[in-house]
């Protein structure tokens, strides 16, 4: 089987490259004719949301935005005018966002990194190498809440990335103006490149219109770097002789472990990070005794899965150019996943060297040393990762990764293992982004294991306005091990086809509707079917952007290991037992223009062991613009099973309140009650961004047993950080 799969992958790769080469040879950049000429500022600029400097009057303007939603066949009805300039230190942008309809702007809050679809906003995307694969994004909503992120994979955005920049929003009777200064030290680029990729995006909820300067097909996000225009510099962009940032922190706090019955412990810690620009496009990150106590808590779920759940990385140290590491592979085949490092043991120090060597080469190298965790019985270890990425065929690339874990501590009874992974992948992305795909190969090295330690996987996708065709295949050997990765399932072969067709009625309240069919088929290594899920869906989108999805789902499972269908550590269903059932799922989402929004889902039908399941879940939100945003995430699940399980009901309620006094002063309280885990979690965080990228945090966290109420642990932390550019 392995030889056949390798032969198939070779033929698929040859076919994709031949097709792509023929297309690339005659094509040019999709929006090559959209060129914005940026010139050095003729006067000093103050970032205040007012266009009263002569430099702005002398700057070129970008107008005539194109509508992306609801349809991409005309110019935007909402007028937007963009101007850009620069000096030795900053890249400046000023945007006049005219109002088409009367009334207040729609925003959730002034909090940083807002939800794009729920806010009137202006965002722009810059690609300093014009490679159309990675870059940076900045912007603001109409209340002044900032947005910044790093971009990867041709248009994905990581909003956890955070850096130093300045902005202001000012309102007038017929418009709102966004003005910003982006320090050249905050972005990565190469000296001498005078043409960057750029695009501007406007979301106006009152008119239900999304638009962009360089046109983008409606099936793609406006962040798609395949459709950027060109930012043309009148001279080489300025570079700094020194670009070093030191970010120290000081922390004081108290923790109390009620479960262990130990006295309260007082914490006093110092540590910090440093960012050193080895070149303008290559950055060295260093950390000593890092602390992540201010990071957002994970959103809990009712877990009925047979496999480990995925939660994203949110710690700042791991994020810049993080796609080089965590985007290698697939969502359920990740040879490296940074959350395996430092969540259950202390990080002593670490270093990361990431960025671009030139337009075609990107690299990432990481080394992290952790200490022993006596309480969790985990040995100290050294983690090393090396990754290289070579751009080919315009927007495609070939990647290499090596991941290594060496256990350096010796704790009695600890079970940590040494492990290495090596892999290569080819990522396909056509110039228009209509064709995408991947071919992946991985091998693990673990003492005592030999054979069945390979991963082979691939997918290909065609995505147009009317059609989406997708096929993914995976093989993961039963002995494949990624000790520093996320691979919840091994020993299987998977086939996942999907087909979607959209219809666009004319002169109707319905914007689009379509039929989607997909399947996930799993086999063991002997190609015997173990489980599959087939889904047939009808998807309806109205012109106000509200949506309705109705799905019929057919499941078959032949258990390969014992499984408790309630995930409450009761008796398990036996290996080899077969389970067949059907369910109906209905998902409805409100229009984002309302101050009251919701996304509600109901799932009902069969379940394991001839049982029945009803699940009601969703998120309901209300905003008092722009200061308070209230959201409640909830789930009620009712399982009806034969003995020994019986009737089981789970409830999860997670109210969250965001209060934004200004766009630099936030208070967030998040309470999560999880009946399945018998857990009540409270996290309250006050954040004052007293200067760009520098913060004061006050964080209170508590975990308790809800019934009868009994605290497990409590923690109060005060943390100060300062971003110092040397």
Image: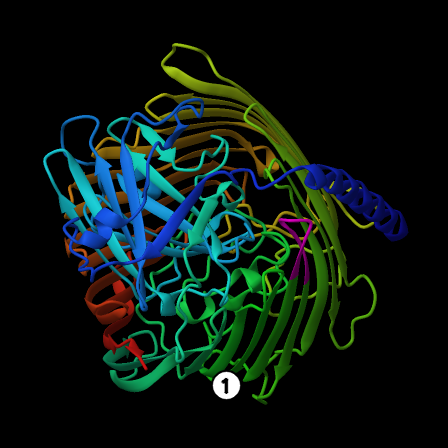
Q: Nearer the viewer, residue 637 or 466?
A: 466
Q: Nearer the viewer, residue 547 or 585?
A: 547
- Position of residue 76 in the picture relative to residue 470 (left or right): left
Q: Residue at x 57, y 52 (%)?
A: 571
Q: Is residue 290 above or below residue 48?
A: below
Q: Residue at x 23, y 68 (%)?
A: 699
The local secondary structure at tag 1 comes to loop
Q: How far from the left and from the top, in percent, is residue 141? A: 25, 45
Q: Residue at x 46, y 31 (%)?
A: 603
- Position of residue 215 in the picture relative to residue 205 (left or right): right
Q: Which residues are magenta?
A: 390-399
Q: Which residue is mark 1?
A: 372
| Quadrant that contains the C terminus | bottom left
Q: Residues within 10 Å of mark 1 (few under 14, many from 20)?
A: many
Residue 228 visible? The answer is yes
Q: Residue at x 42, y 63 (%)?
A: 237
Residue 113 visible? The answer is no
Q: How far from the left and from the top, in percent, is residue 163? A: 34, 65
Q: Is residue 670 above or below residue 117?
A: below
Q: Is residue 464 above or below residue 456?
A: above
Q: Is residue 701 magenta?
A: no
Q: How far from the left and from the top, in percent, is residue 155? A: 50, 47
In terms of secondary structure, what is the magenta stretch mainly?
A: strand
């Amino acid at each position: 089987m392995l030889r056949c799969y390798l032969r198939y992958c070779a033929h698929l790769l040859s076919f994709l490259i031949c097709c792509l080469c023929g297309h690339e040879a005659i094509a040019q950049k999709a929006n090559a004719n959209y060129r914005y000429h940026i010139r050095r500022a003729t006067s000093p600029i103050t970032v205040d949301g007012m266009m009263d400097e002569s430099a702005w009057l002398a700057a070129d303007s970008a107008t005539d935005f194109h509508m992306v939603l609801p349809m991409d066949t005309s110019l935007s009805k909402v007028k937007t005018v963009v101007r850009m300039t620069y000096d030795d230190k900053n890249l400046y942008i000023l945007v006049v966002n005219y109002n088409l309809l009367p009334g207040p702007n729609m925003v959730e809050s002034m909090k940083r990194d807002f939800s794009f679809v729920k806010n009137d906003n202006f965002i722009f995307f810059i690609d300093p190498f014009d490679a159309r694969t990675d870059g940076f994004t900045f912007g603001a909503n109409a209340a002044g809440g900032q947005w910044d992120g790093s971009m990867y994979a041709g248009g994905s955005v990581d909003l956890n990335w955070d850096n130093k920049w300045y902005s202001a929003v000012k309102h007038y009777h017929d418009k709102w103006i966004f003005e910003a200064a982006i320090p050249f030290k905050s972005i990565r680029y190469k000296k001498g490149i005078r043409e960057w990729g750029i695009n501007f995006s406007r979301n106006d909820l009152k008119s239900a219109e999304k638009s962009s300067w360089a046109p983008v097909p409606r099936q793609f996000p406006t962040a798609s770097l395949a459709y950027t225009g060109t930012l043309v510099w009148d001279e080489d962009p300025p570079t700094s002789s020194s670009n070093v940032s030191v970010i120290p922190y000081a922390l004081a706090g108290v923790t109390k472990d009620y479960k262990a019955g130990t006295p309260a412990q007082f914490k006093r810690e110092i540590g910090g990070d440093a960012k050193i620009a080895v070149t303008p496009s290559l950055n060295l990150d260093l950390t000593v005794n890092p602390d992540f106590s201010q990071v957002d808590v994970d959103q809990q779920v009712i877990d009925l899965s047979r496999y480990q759940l995925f939660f994203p990385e949110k710690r700042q140290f791991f994020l810049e150019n993080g796609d080089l590491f965590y985007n290698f592979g697939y969502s359920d085949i990740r040879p490296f996943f940074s959350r395996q490092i430092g969540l259950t043991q202390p990080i002593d120090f670490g270093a990361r060297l990431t960025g671009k060597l030139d337009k075609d080469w990107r690299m990432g190298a990481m080394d992290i040393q952790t200490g022993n965790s006596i309480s969790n019985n985990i040995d100290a270890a050294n983690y090393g990762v090396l990754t290289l990425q070579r751009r080919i065929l315009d927007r495609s690339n070939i990647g290499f990764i090596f991941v290594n874990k060496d256990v350096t501590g010796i704790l009695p009874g600890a079970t940590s293992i040494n492990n290495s992974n090596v892999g290569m992948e080819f990522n396909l992305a056509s110039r228009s982004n209509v064709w995408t795909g991947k071919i992946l190969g991985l091998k693990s090295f673990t003492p005592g294991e030999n054979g069945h330690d390979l991963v082979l996987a691939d997918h290909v996708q065609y995505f147009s306005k009317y059609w989406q065709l997708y096929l993914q295949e995976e093989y993961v050997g039963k002995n494949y091990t990624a000790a520093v990765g996320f691979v919840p399932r091994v020993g299987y072969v998977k086939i996942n086809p999907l087909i979607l067709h959209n219809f666009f009625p004319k002169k109707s309240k319905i914007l689009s509707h379509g039929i989607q069919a997909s399947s996930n088929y799993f086999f063991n290594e002997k190609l015997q079917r173990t489980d599959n899920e087939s889904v047939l869906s009808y998807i309806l989108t109205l012109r106000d952007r509200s949506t309705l999805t109705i799905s019929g789902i057919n499941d078959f499972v032949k258990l390969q290991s014992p499984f408790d269908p309630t995930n409450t550590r009761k008796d398990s269903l036996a290996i080899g037992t077969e389970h067949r059932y059907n369910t109906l799922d209905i998902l409805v989402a409100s229009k984002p223009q309302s101050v009251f929004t919701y996304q509600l889902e109901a799932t009902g039908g069969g379940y394991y062991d001839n049982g029945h399941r009803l699940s009601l879940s969703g998120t309901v939100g209300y905003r008092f613009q722009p200061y308070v945003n209230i959201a409640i995430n909830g789930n009620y699940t009712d399982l009806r099973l034969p003995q020994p399980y019986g009737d089981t009901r789970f409830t999860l309620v997670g109210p969250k309140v965001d209060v934004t006094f200004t766009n630099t002063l936030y208070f967030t309280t998040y309470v999560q009650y999880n009946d399945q885990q018998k857990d009540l979690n409270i996290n309250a965080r006050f954040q004052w961004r007293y200067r760009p990228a520098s913060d004061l945090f006050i964080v209170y966290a508590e975990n308790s047993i809800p019934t009868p109420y009994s605290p497990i642990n409590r923690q109060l932390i005060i943390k100060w950080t300062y971003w110092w550019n040397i």
